[in-house]
Image (cartoon, grey):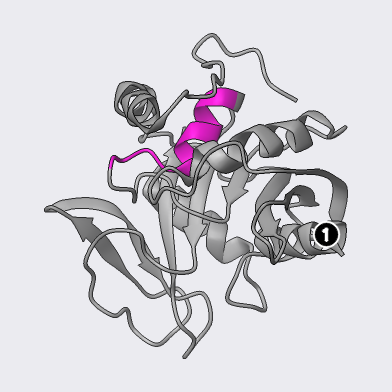
Amino acid sequence: MTGTRKDQVPYVPPADVAEALRVQEELRSRVDLVGPGPTAPATVAGLDVAYAETGDRFAAAVTVLDAATLAVVDEAVSVGRPAFGYVPGLFAFRELPALLAALDRLTVRPELLVCDGHGLAHPRRFGLACHLGLVTGLPAIGVGKTPLVGEWAEPGPERGAWTPLRDGGEVVGRVLRTRGGVKPVFVSVGHRMSLANAADRVLSLTPRYRLPETTRTADRLSRRALA
């Protein structure tokens, strides 16, 4: 399900950690952090990965939701083994091949990718959402349960309250309260989206729970695939 945009980049597996670091440093300048991205996408995809207890096998799942009803309209899964070692900040290289394989099996092309992870809010400003966005050519955002980098103040207790996530003086995301009185999530731009739009899209995907329905459905699918 790869697109045809001229600015897409092919995914090339790195040979080692040094090459993976070099790839992140080289590609981050090609990420579109302005967008503004789709404000009313018809379809939105969630991407998540579940690991077996042994850690040597996982299922990469993609679910496509109707953005208006949040009903699942398409889904795909790819079961395999990590393509790279366990190195903090380089998880994208473990999971990208399987996620791309699952995306290629879809029959409905989503207008936005929502990753269970981070985009700009990454030590080298190139998390999974950035890499997936560049390779697919699709707008992408990251929604993390916990932060990878940065400092922040606690947002207000009401739904929709947010504070900036800053790292080294740079705003790299938003700490967003999706449910009143519940722990916030960490939203960052992946590719071809503005931060404000990314936060709005996350709120539209969280009518009942803390995590976006995209993440919840992809998580269930990935776990079923491993069962």
Residue depicted at x 78% and y 50%: 63
Main SS type for the magenta part? helix
**Screen quadrant of the N terminus:** top right
- Image-based side of 41 in relation to 64, left or right: left
Tell me the quarter of the picture where residue 2 sits.
top right
Q: Furthest residue to the bottom?
A: 181
**Screen quadrant of the C terminus:** bottom right
- Rendering coords of residue 146 (x, y %): 43, 69
Q: Nearer the viewer, residue 85 or 197?
A: 85
Residue depicted at x 27% and y 61%: 165
Residue depicted at x 44% and y 37%: 36
- Rendering coords of residue 200 (x, y %): 50, 58
Residue at numbered disc 1? 226
Tell me the quarter of the picture where residue 81 sits.
top right
User: Is 153 situated above or below 195?
Assistant: below
Residue depicted at x 35% and y 61%: 174
Q: Nearer the viewer, residue 102 or 153?
A: 102
- Image-based side of 181 in relation to 42, left or right: left
Q: Furthest residue to the top?
A: 6
Near mark 1 (Cα within 10 A), the count class, few <14, some 14-19 or many ≥20, is some
Element type where label 1 sits in the image: helix
Which amino acid type corresponds to the residue marked 1 in the rendered image?
A: Leu
Asked if residue 38 shows in the view, the reply is no
- Rendering coords of residue 212 (x, y %): 63, 65
Number of numbered discs on residues: 1
- Image-based side of 3 in relation to 185, left or right: right
Q: Nearer the viewer, residue 222 or 84?
A: 84
In the image, the segment drawn in magenta is: 124-135
User: Is 104 situated above or below 61?
Assistant: above
- Rendering coords of residue 183 (x, y %): 45, 82
User: Is 159 situated above or below 225?
Assistant: below
